[in-house]
Amino acid sequence: MSDDSSPSRRSLLRALGVVGAAGGVGVAASETSRTTGSATAARQTPSTWPQIGFDAAKTGTVGRGSLPAAPRGRLWRAREGEEGFSAPVADGDRVYYGHDEGLTAVDAETGEIAWTRTVGTVRGAPAIGTDFVYAGTNRSTVTARDPDLGGQEWSRDVDGPVYADLTVTGDTVFVGTIDGGVTALDADSGTPAWTTDVDARIDHAPAYDAESERVFVVDRDDGVTALAADDGEVLWESSTRARATGAPTVSEGSLIVVNEIGDVHAFSISNGDERWLERTSEAITGSPAVDDDGLYIGTEEGDVRAQSTVAGSRQWLTSVPGVPVTDPILVGDTVLVATDRGRVVALDREDGDERWRFSIEGTPVEGLALASDRLFYVQSNGRVTGLGTVTTPTPTATATPTTTETPTPTTTETPTTTTTTATPTTTETPTATMTEPPTATDVPTGTVTPTETATRLFGPGFGPLAAAAALGLVAWRAVRDADD
């Protein structure tokens, strides 16, 4: 059992002043990636994925720019618990997820279990705040934990078991219960600010609009309710005609709610009037991802749809391999979904064209989280996996020193060296469809690059000195091999 009074790793780093210091250790150079023959724009993936839907508005959207290319391979795989897993959340150090036995944190770099706390069943996704990670339980409690050590900071009773994902703003945690209560808790102390009963079970995360300072919930009886964030007063109520399939989403003065019979509703945030209604005729899975240009949803028919946020009209529709089982993630110009056939698929935001896909072994994915150029997912069998993107070393046939970065493999790239051994890029298909590559421990020793050599000898982040030493070692090995 950990000592809850022990200082956390974050607090020690802040005290030493090492975060952001000039000449800091371990800062990786920016890279670009190509999957269809052209370089992507500078990446803008988040350093954290703090809650379901990414933000308190539940937009599922991470800025502009472009997602790096398809994952290079599995960085690690961990397992904790037996069943009943939540979607993951992540920061720069840890991946957090709930299960029937409690709450677990996994090291984001290595996949090692950092800690597990038996707090009751945690079915909804946790949420990461400024200082703590929060989880709701089937014991009718919400608990705040130290992210590094897992020590309890506070625990508060709420009016019923919590199966919905949590929502956190800077100073408040919003929680819905299966008994129909919506509660606002102080993020630092856990002190309840208010509780409002909406008279029906809440299965999805509340959404928060900072501009209007309102909280929105959908319930199992088809209801939609707007509450004042400061005191929980009911401001308006409406209905979606059928059960909502995911959290409500805030978008440019509208509240977007989707349901199980294929309706997409846009309600006015100010008074609850219906601005528009689009009936898709396809049952919708999960919440939409929304930006200024459109909204993106998955359907039971195995499609991903893009629709206008102004009138709800369809912009494009793309079939994917399987039924989307995760909420879409919109990162820059790419839409990401995972399907029930074990595929993570990346689509172009503008036209829906498939960019790449990645195969996942085993049971269906419960949720995705994208942080620090890594993609994390939790499966229903308890596997938690971290995938590398452009930051993962690319195997090459020879370790030839060069002053420029190694280009990302593409289907049109010409090999820069002559060798009798085929490079990994020769098997890549024009559609960039991928199966899960071997882990780093499965890569033959003859494919180690100078960068990998530097990392193994000196540890990550030792900069030009380590790289130069590694290049020298590679050259010495080459001369030795030639002499032999």
Image: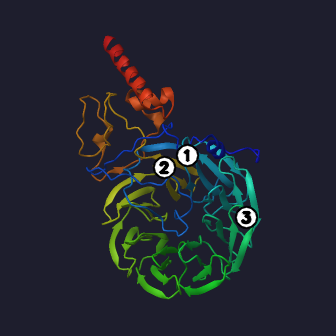
Horizontal side, residue 348 vs residue 365: left or right: left
- For the residues bearing labels 3 and 2, Cβ distance under 8 angstroms: no
Q: Which residue is mark 1?
A: 108
Residue 102 appears left or right of 260: right
Name the mark on residue 190: 3
Q: Amino acid at mark 3?
A: Gly
Residue 327: image x %, image y %? 48, 65
The answer for how far apart the CA atoms under marks 3 and 2 are is 29 Å
Note whether residue 101 is visible.
no
- Rendering coords of residue 355 (x, y %): 33, 56
Q: Looking at the picture, tell me which residue is in the foreground, 67 or 43.
A: 43
* Alpha carbon distance from label 3 to label 1: 27 Å
Q: Quadrant of the N terminus?
A: top right
Q: Do labels 3 and 1 touch, CB within 8 Å? A: no
* Relative side of 140 to 479, left or right: right
Number of on-image labels = 3
Tell me the element at label 2. Answer: loop
Give the image location of residue 134, x and y in percent: 66, 59
Residue sitting at x 45%, y 79%: 264
**Looking at the image, can residue 275 be seen?**
yes
Q: Left or right: where does residue 54 sit relative to residue 72?
A: right
Q: Nearer the viewer, mark 3 or mark 1?
A: 3
- Which residue is at the front of the view, 44 or 359? 44
Whether the residues at callouts 1 and 2 have beta carbons within 8 Å, the answer is yes
